[in-house]
């Protein structure tokens, strides 16, 4: 059985943590050689899925949020026509 290029897709996913990159104040011992990254644990994780066909067709990206209910404002500013889901 032969698979034609229009039926062959490649998908990739990337996990992203929202809300990182801000300043954090930490109190450590003066003689501590290594200071580890400190997070407050309240950051949201999002998965982004991209799919492309071998014939060059690109499907809109999908953004998967963690939760039970979608916010209606998600996708309001959506220049790449991404799909949003939970």
Image (cartoon, rainbow, N blue to C red):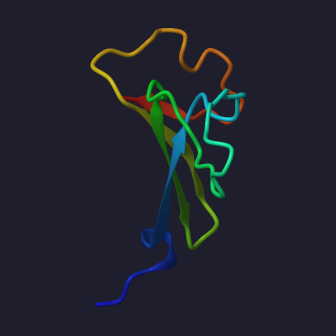
Relative to 65, does residue 3 appear above or below in the rendering?
below
* Quadrant including the N terminus: bottom left
Which residue: 45% across, 24% down?
Answer: 42
Front in this rendered view, residue 28 or 85: 28
Front in this rendered view, residue 48 or 51: 48
Hey, which quadrant is residue 75 in on the image? top right
- The residue positioned farthest toward the front in the image shown: 31
How many numbered marks does the figure carry?
Answer: 0
| 16 to the left or right of 7 | right
Which residue: 57% across, 35% down?
Answer: 82
Front in this rendered view, residue 8 or 4: 8
| 78 to the left or right of 38 | right
Relative to 54, does residue 72 appear above or below in the rendering?
above
Relative to 41, does residue 8 appear above or below in the rendering?
below
Place of residue 36 in the rendered image (x, y in percent of width and height, measured from the top left): 58, 49
Place of residue 50 in the rendered image (x, y in percent of width and height, measured from the top left): 54, 53
Which residue: 53% across, 34% down?
Answer: 39
Place of residue 70 in the rendered image (x, y in percent of width and height, measured from the top left): 38, 16
Hey, which quadrant is residue 58 in on the image? bottom right
Place of residue 35 in the rendered image (x, y in percent of width and height, measured from the top left): 63, 49
* Quadrant including the C terminus: top left
Which residue: 54% across, 66% down?
Answer: 53
- The residue positioned farthest toward the top in the image shown: 72
């Amino acid at each position: 059985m032969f698979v034609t290029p229009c039926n062959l897709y490649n998908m990739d996913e990337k996990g992203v943590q929202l809300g990182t990159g801000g300043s954090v104040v930490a109190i450590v011992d003066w003689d501590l050689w290594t200071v580890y990254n400190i997070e407050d644990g309240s950051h949201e994780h999002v998965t982004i899925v991209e799919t492309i066909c071998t014939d060059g067709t690109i499907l809109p990206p999908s953004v998967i949020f963690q939760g039970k209910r979608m916010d209606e404002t998600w996708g309001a500013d959506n220049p790449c026509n991404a799909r949003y889901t939970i």
